Structures are given as structure tokens and as C-alpha cells.
Amino acid sequence: MKMMRFIPFKCAAAAAVFALAALSGEILAQPTFGNPSPTAGTETSQKANAAADVAAYKEVEYANKGTKGPALVVIPGEVKSTHATFAQKFGPNNIADFAELELSQANFTVLERNNLGNLLQEISLAYNLGDVDKARKTMQVGKLKTTKWIVKFDILKAEQIAENKEGFSGRSIGGIIGMFGGLGGSVAGQATGSVQTQDSTGVWLIGMRYKIMDANTTEQVAQGYKELKMEVGAKQTSVLGVSQSAKGGVGLDTMVQRLVQTAVYEIDSKYK
């Protein structure tokens, strides 16, 4: 009889465990979002989403992520490209934001610039000029005492190096078919004349340099350069009044982030 008394309690405890497990599963589940687009699920939507998936952010599995990296500060680098579009879109702080994110993902101890306040300008000036006395004085403040590295990322190149266009117009051929083919040829000529196709592709080269400096001496510890291609393209076809077009490619934001990821991968692999 004594054993019988504990059975309900055991059942209740088991039920509580399962309930907690289920609740934990709900908490840990990935968020899902709807798609309010009127073209959701159509062929154009599927193609556009497939292209976007290729360009979407992907986490990098850094080789030495299991090893804690030294404490560091990312200072704003320089955008040395003379290309107007790139210079207008990007500033040094954009690139430093990406760098802080990726260095944290690689398990470096990153002291974020937002926490430095007015000190950030002093730090940047000291290390850009190689002013050892100013650097040492700045590094004696609060959390900065544990900082080992100062890291910066510069864009050295952003230029379109190639462009190619191809197109076909059926008007001339359609006119010839219509002239010599009678009624059937006239119909065929109109159909052929309605065919219009155009493809265009542009390729950019974007290059980034990273530089690691000793927080105490301002001396350069290491540097590297990474360069990636960015391709953008557009395609348009029209036949008998039915048109189809597509355009896309990786944007400048994505290219900068991928360059930062490539640079951080090398820093993590070689210098941690």
C-alpha cells in the first residue's frame, strides 16, 4: 500500500519533466516569419529567393574558435577607394562594426567602440600616428589595461574591372522572313521580329587590408590583404509581348562583410 501512494507523485513528476522539456523546446526553437508579398510562392518569387539565399549572411566556422583570443580594440580604418558609389555608401565605422562582430564570433575578446566614448578618437589618432607615449597613456584607462592588440581594416580597392553586354533583336530577320514568305512568312516574321534579348554583366574587384598593432608599442604585429570579385548582372527577354527579366548579384554590404570574414579567418588561423 505504501508503494501505491508514491505512484501518483512519480507520474506527476514525470509529467512535469516532459512539460519542461517541451517548454524548453519552444523557447529554443528558431523564429519563423511569414511572407506578405503578393507574389509569394510564384516562379518569380522562387527564383528571386534562390538568388537571395546565395547572397545571405553565413556564419564562418573559424578554425581556432575553441581557443580564446587576446583582448583587442577595432579602430575605424580608411576607405581609400576613389569610386564615388563605394565612398558614399561606406564609412570606416561600417567596416569596424562588421569586424567587431566577426572577431567576437571567432572568440576574441573585443572591447566595443561604443563603450570607449571620447577615448576612441584618442586611440585612433595615437595608433595611426604611431605615437607610443600617447598610446601607452591611453591604454592605462579602465578595461583598456588588458588590451593586447589594436586592429584596423582598410578598403584599398573598389573598382569595376570588366563589363560585358550581349543582345539579340529579331526585327531585321523578321522583316526578311515577312518579305519573302507570303502569309505564313508574315506571321513567322512578326513572331521572330518580336524576339528581344539582352544580357549584361559587370565584375568588380574589392580589396581589404587588415593590420594588427601591439597595444603597448604601436608596432605592427601582422598585416594581410584579401581581394574578392563581385559580379552583378541583368537579363531580359521579350517574345510576342511576353517579357521576363532578372537582375541581381552580391551587394557592396555583403562583399565588405565577406572580406572581413576572410581576413578574420586568417587572423584566427595564424595569429591567435
Image (cartoon, grey):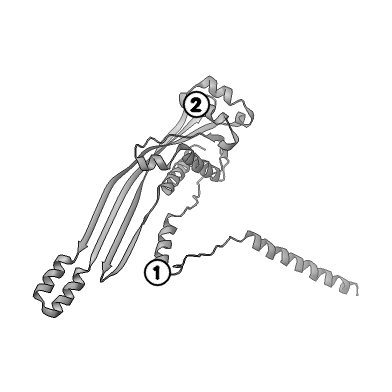
Disc on res. 58:
none
Amino acid type indicated by mark 2: Leu
Q: Is residue 249 above or below residue 101?
A: below
Q: From the viewer's side, name the closer residue of 43 and 238.
A: 238
Residue 151 spot, x, y in % from top left: 49, 34
Q: Quadrant of residue 31?
A: bottom right
Q: Residue at x 42, y 70 (%)?
A: 42
Measure the C-alpha gap from mark 2 to mark 1: 53 Å
Bin the neighbour count of mark 2 within 10 Å (Cα to Cα): few under 14, some 14-19, many 20 and up: some
Observer able to see residue 226: no
* Residue corresponding to mark 1: 43
Q: Secondary structure at mark 1?
A: helix
Q: Is residue 101 left or right of residue 50?
A: right
- What residue is shown with label 2? 125
Q: Is residue 87 left or right of residue 97?
A: left
Callout 1 amino acid: Glu
User: What residue is at 43 percent from the left and 58 percent from the top?
Assistant: 52
Q: Earlier in the sequence, mark 2 or mark 1?
A: 1
In the image, 54 versus 3, the foreground residue is 54
Farthest residue, direction right: 1
**Residue 103's x, y, as percent?**
52, 42
Residue 81 percent coordinates (x, y): 36, 37
**Which of 165/209 is in front?**
165
Q: Where residue 176 appears, x then y in whole percent?
A: 11, 70
